[in-house]
Image (cartoon, coloured by chain):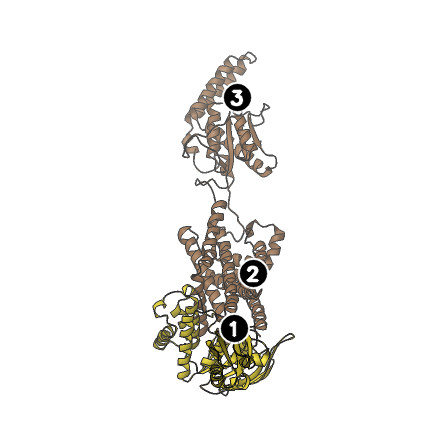
Amino acid sequence: MIEVRELHKNYGDLHAVDGVSFEIAAGEAFGLLGPNGAGKSTTILMIVGALAPDSGQVMLDGQVDPTRAEVRRKVGIAPQDLAIYDELTGSENLAFFGKLYGMRGAKLAERVDWGLEFAGLEDRRADRAAGYSGGMKRRLNLACALIHAPRIFFCDEPTVGVDPQSRNHIFESIEGLKRDGCTLIYTTHYMEEAERLCDRVAIIDSGKVLAVDTPAALVDQHGGASIVEAEFTEAPPPDLLQRGTFADGWLKLETDRPIEAIAALGKGGADIANLRIRRPNLERVFLHLTGRSLRD
Amino acid sequence: MGPILTLALKDVKLVVRDKFALFWLFAFPLIYALFFGAIFGSDDGDGSRGRMGVAIVDDDGSQASRDLAARLADHSALRVDRVSEGDDAAPLLHSVEDARDLVRRGKLAAYIQILPGFGETPWGMFGGGGDPMIEVGIDPSRTAEAGMLQGVMMESLFGGMTARFGDKDWLLEQTASAREDIAGAADLSGVQKLVFSNFMSALDVFFTQIDFDSLEGDGPGVLAGGADMVNVVEVTRERGNVPRSTFEITFPTAMIWGLMSVALTFAITIVRERTQGTLLRLRVAPISGAQILAGKALGCFLMCQVVMIFLMAVGTLALDIRVASVPLLIVAMVSIACCFTGLMMVASVTGKTEQAVAGASWGLMMPFAMIGGGMIPLIAMPSWLLTLSNFSPFKWGIIAMEGAIWRGFSIADMVMPCTILIGLGAAFFAVGVWIFRRGEG
């Protein structure tokens, strides 16, 4: 459905996108995971034809020119900014963008109602967007991008600055799109979102794709061992201390077999007050690949 | 056309819902037109605008001086305060000190002092060798007004003479008085007294038999007023058409201010689309960049029309502005809107943020307003500024509007300002689009 080959975009000496390549199958949810400034949004802008690459090629649904009208009708984008009109009501925003995609009459009214329901704004349909909360605006932003029922949906950091309730609403909405077979390209710097929503994830930093695979495979390949942490009621025996590092009353063990490690701790003769297991995740993957945290 | 109209109507709706923008688009131009129209058109409600204010000092107090004061007060070129409301009221008489003070402080243009003895020597004024019986006090710098006042004085004095020589009783009194003087004259011989007495008797017969009523009315009769010998015709610039009121001058200017606000508002909406991300959404919609810009242009054009129609409606319905040619007015409105739409496009690329565009746009448009008649009416400009104003679209916009409203332009007259406006609009738009596309590339 989407094929990206060696995309490059420079701003002076800054290599915003530096040879990015990947492929996305129809109906797949693909995540671009990286910190702010990694080049995720620039990559998306080039894929949808809003920004001309310095070099490289993009194919959307078999078309090499993403600016063609028939290609654009298949594409929806929810920008990171709240790309709605504050002085228009929720339904007016939806109707305006629907009209740009050629919808009229009953079809438009039907899609506007769908959009309001999608955004959870049925009761606020006649209110101007200026009076909406941040979460409401974020949901309306998504609905406006989906008003024409695109087959390919670009979703750029959709949960920035929203409350947990709206975040959950957004997750459920996007999961619904996945179920409906929409091809999803999702950029985020929250690894939890990528793990929850994406079938495959590209780790991107400084304009380069560092790894592409399923979240589980990435964790397996680059996440390292699990970490078992145990707090004891008294000082643990010396043989336990030799297995890991001890600080502030906690013993930390790195292991590929955490269950066996816990069993061994239990047999060590000391009383355990607290026990934690930290599985490797995409955050650890990013740390392993770049030496930096996602939130740095 | 569908997406373009959709974009345009969306922008119009956004502007209409912005109270701040509405003030600058509608309220400010209206306030401007009404304020300056009222100031420049002020005549205190009595039609006295354009008349010369004078104070009258009557130090003679005779019937002749009172008559002269009344004639001066009734003169159409003078504005004289009266003792009470109404044109029939007697003129308010001042002391010479008060009158001189009023002139010195600029409250009045001049004062006319009728000196003692004026009534005793009614013709002494005409070079009889005696002292002047009337004194006029006026600022020496007001040369033109002084000349005009002298003319008004002469007209009023001749008017007095005309009245006297049309009064049969007064004439018979004069001949009787002369006859007594002849009879008592010691330096006349008997024959001379007889000749003069017979002449006075003949005059009595003449005055008694003449029909004075037939001497009144039109025509250059011997007793007719001197003013009738001069016919004053109004010759005005611009093909004999003049504004009927100052509002016909201030409203076109106010419209241009309103359109400047429209251009500025729409220029800011383009930048706002970019900064809030909606431009990206428009650019990935199945519409071309040209359609997006055309939508902006159409929105600006429509809003220009709304502002002009609103102001014209207020002007015509409430202030009696009369449009000389509705078709030409429509042509002017379309041309002006084209020009300001182009100006909007250039203004939109003068900065990357709303603040930058707002500041730069004022910087771009204010010089046009200053030299183009936005601050000083074109009819009040010195010649050098009028020449400079040719470079301002404001001037051509105002001329086109005035041409359709009161200058009485023909189609041929309208071609030049409208061609310039449309040409400037096209050029501005092309430059703006070129810069915009470079920035988006």
Q: Kindly indicate whether the residues beneath marks 2 and 1 are on one polypeptide chain.
A: no
Q: Is residue B306 above or below residue B243?
A: below
Q: What separation in Å lies between label 2 and label 1 (alpha carbons)?
A: 66 Å
Quarter of the image where the N terminus of chain B is located? bottom left
Q: Which quarter of the rendered picture does the C terminus of chain B lie within?
A: bottom right
| Residue highlighted by disc 1 | A249
Q: Which chain is brown?
A: B
Same chain check for tags 2 and 3: yes
- Image chain in yellow: A
- Given residues B262 and A156, the one toward you in this image is A156
Amino acid type at image mark 2: Ser
Left or right: residue B145 versus residue A131 is right
Q: Residues within 10 Å of mark 3 (few under 14, many from 20)?
A: some
Mark found first going from the N terminus, 2 or 3: 3
Q: Position of residue B379 (x, y in %)?
A: 55, 50
Image quadrant in which you'd find residue B437? bottom right
Secondary structure under the numbered disc 3 in the rendered image: loop
| Residue picked out by circle 2 | B361
Output the chain of dot 2: B
**Which is more foreground, mark 2 or mark 3?**
2
Residue B129 shows in the view: yes
